[in-house]
Amino acid sequence: MNDVKRTPDVDVVVVGAGFAGLYLLHRFREMGLAALAFERGGDVGGTWYWNRYPGARCDVQSIDYSYSWDTELDDQWEWSERYATQPEILRYLGFVADKHDLRRDVRFSTGVDGAVWNDDTSLWEVRTDDGATTTCRYYVMATGCLSVMKDPDLAGVADFAGDVYYTGRWPHDDVDFTGKRVGVIGTGSSAIQSIPIIASQAADLTVFQRTPNFSLPAYNGPVRPDDAAQINADRTGYREAARWSSGGVPREIPVDSALAVSEDVRRARYEGAWQEGTIFSMMGSFNDIMVNAEANATAAEFVRDKIRAAVDDPATAELLCPTTYPLGTKRLCLDTNYYTTFNEPHVHLVDLHANPISSITPTGIDVVSDDGATSYEFDAIVMATGFDAMTGAIVAVDIEGRDGAELRERWVDGPRTYLGLMSAGFPNMFMVTGPQSPSVLSNMAVSIEQHVDWICDTIEHLRASGHTVIEPTSTAEDGWVQHANDFADITLFPEANSWYMGANVPGKARVVLPYLGGVDRYRRICDEVVERDFLGFEIGGANGAEVNDGVICRVQPDVSIMLEMMEEMALPPLDSMSPVDARAFSEAMSAASPPGPEVGEVLDGTLPGADGNDLAYRLYRPATPGPHPIVVYFHGGGWVIGNATSDDPLCRDLCDQSGSIIISVDYRHAPEARFPAAPDDGFAATTWVAQHAEELGGLSGGLAVAGWSAGANIAAVVAQRARDEGGPTITGQLLLNPVTDGDLTRASYVENADGYILTRALMAWFWDHYADPDQRSDPQASPLRASNLADLPPAMIVTSEFDPLRDEGEAYAQALAAAGVDVHHLRARGQIHTSIPAVGALLSGAGTRSEMAQALRGFSGAGVPA
Ligand code: FAD
Ligand code: NAP
């Protein structure tokens, strides 16, 4: 017991001495901590130490892809080109290492094989391949996102009699392909950079392509004067702007959709992006390239046209055109003369989809062909087959955390991290640019510095507060994994079999690996975690541990973005307006919203309301042959605002997805017509529609009611009245965020009183315009108060997590179920009161909308579509 060594050999072990490891060593030294780095390579440089293949260079401009922590470097180092070559970047990192005397803290040519957390000592025991063990308090994996090569998974490689080169482990001596027959396998960034240069040397070059990539011209050359002027005008400001940009490079963010402009405008924008020669330009040319397949297709086709223009042979050009995934969902490439290389007579392209490789042979490569096999003979083969990205280097180490938990096992279904920085069960272990952080989707120099700063500042905080151990909670980790996946789900990234998705490595879990929310948002989140007293962490030491459990980012990502935009617009609250102004305001907002899907037919008409006056209705008919089931729908708007137009996108969506006729009926608005005008109109309209079902093209014998918010309140009341007044027959009720009670004191009113568009104050304003206080307990105003809830039609009740009305909707669901009604309740995670109806604008509500449509199909007995 007593000989347990509680004093570590060093304060920190760092694994890796690339961009990240070097900056970590510098910061730890500044903090007065003893840090030791282990590096498998023979020198500093990481990526730039290993990837020495011909043509290797950065694809983020060197003025951006460089350190900002040492401001002297801007004067001491001048980049010779926009995109520096590998030797120049390696020299730069060597220069930084020399300048700060960092090599003395690195043990080179030493790999870390294992790391075990010792709960007794609260230390990590780090095992290296020289047989030694080093103990440390903090263990930092600066092992790189693209540092472990993927096994090319090809039979016979060892039999090849010629030379085999791997781009990610290129020899240090010059490789000369002059006069040789060379085969290159792969067409990712490494291949695309090296192929033109290998072609310029080789006697014959054959490229084996499985999936073509989108590549843009780098237009490399001296740093462009405009770019230099921009950075030199205010270097500090420029670096700060990079930290708060979405990709780690300052640039304007477009606000318009590719589909909202003319073909000419779109092509002009793409041509500008093409000429810019950066990887960010094309994806960032409109605001929806990475979220809308149709928008993306316009950019993809522009690039394909460029490929067709560059390559002489039309068949080769078509083979080089990517068609199976959206642009940008596989890492875009930047090239110099890639496509035109295929115009040279000694350069050939083999399509591995048509002719897969069967094996590497002693003389070359055999592919399957129509007549059995075709053999290609080579003197050298280049494997440009990529990496086990983002998780490969982390799970390559045997990491054992608390209670013997093995990280590799924990991550078998995909990585689990909090902020991409730490993992629950692995105290004091940090990852630089770990999975679920922006990392590879950004200028890595910026993301690495942010992570190093966060890690070092956190360790500083621990020391200052007398703590020694930090670990994320599993709640926080689950929440972050969910948030990262939610972000991915509203983008096109999951559509590609890319290394971003882990899809390039057979057997690897297919989950999105980088965080898609952008560098700026991510930095804000990391800062917020700290400001909220390390939300989601357990922090402890000799005097015990404190847990600050919780989840950061609970609102759906697109809803969050919308809320931020609205906050920036500083719109006046509706409850500060007159009802007339509030209606005009709401109409202007509706006019600016994206339309819903096309339906077979939309008709406007009138029907008699409860007081004999005409009520407008809008009928949405599916494109499929009728007759169709009918749903009478009531719009939202607190009985004061709204109309068929405000809820038009949702009605279209419900019509399209459920195959029902949706009849969106108006009802008299308060305060001009107060309670009970709205439910009276609702009941009259439903009765009229039931009587005219066949004329309207619908099925007779029953209809469903539906509504959102106050409209759902009316739908619920109509269902009760139809039961009590002998018809019409209501087959089901779909209630989205319903008002069911005039009690504004429930917990959801307190938790979500403000900040989620429908505020407590606005709801009070609606009620005041609608009903006197003594009327609010009437079941026709508050259907939850009905003395009898039995024998009501089946219900689907959707509530939103961040809605003041959430709890009364849930109370109604429970009360209906208790009364024996068939109820399906869905609480929409991360949604707010107004987000589910925002068809076209907010993608995260799509799943809930599908379930709602499915419920409508169920009410009509149509079931789930085949
Ligand atoms: P790395 O540079 O990968 O360094 C990690 C080091 O850890 C490696 O040297 C490795 O040997 C060592 N290591 C790993 N595991 C162990 C272990 N168990 N024991 C001991 N040592 C270990 N990003 C950009 O932003 N812009 C670009 O232009 C760009 N170009 C790139 C070009 C290429 C060819 C590649 C492959 C990547 C490129 N990247 C680019 C991404 C690049 O990886 C990062 O920009 C950055 O270099 C990563 O630095 P790092 O220190 O985090 O990791
Ligand atoms: P990559 O993008 O993963 O490309 C690997 C290529 O090899 C793909 O074309 C892949 O085809 C193919 N491939 C893999 N296994 C194969 C097999 N068994 N048979 C046939 N083909 C096979 O890897 P990379 O080119 O090394 O680039 C990885 C990342 O590193 C880049 O995306 C980028 O982030 C970074 N990088 C940057 C630069 C730069 O310009 N600065 C340069 C190089 C690398 P499939 O697509 O069909 O899987």
Image (cartoon, rainbow, N blue to C red):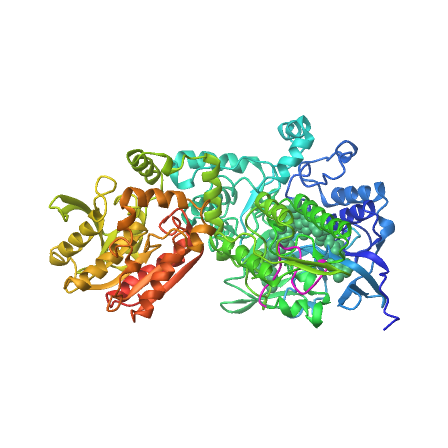
Q: Residue furthest front?
A: 774
Q: Quadrant of residue 826?
A: bottom left
x%, y% of residue 7?
86, 61
x%, y% of residue 393?
69, 61
> In which of the image's four quarters is ligand 2 placed?
bottom right
Choose between 744 and 800: the one closer to the eye. 744
The stretch drawn in magenta includes residue 421: yes
x%, y% of residue 723?
19, 64
Residue found at x 30% / y 44%: 646
The stretch drawn in magenta includes residue 113: no
Residue found at x 48% / y 57%: 495
x%, y% of residue 429?
72, 59
Image quarter in which the N terminus is found: bottom right
Decide if residue 518 is on the left or right side of residue 560. Answer: right
Does residue 818 sit above or below 196 in this rendering? Answer: below
Q: Quadrant of residue 720?
A: bottom left
Report if residue 598 is visible in the image: no
Does residue 518 sit above or below 513 in this rendering? Answer: above
Q: Which residues are magenta?
A: 413-429
Image quarter in which the C terminus is found: bottom left
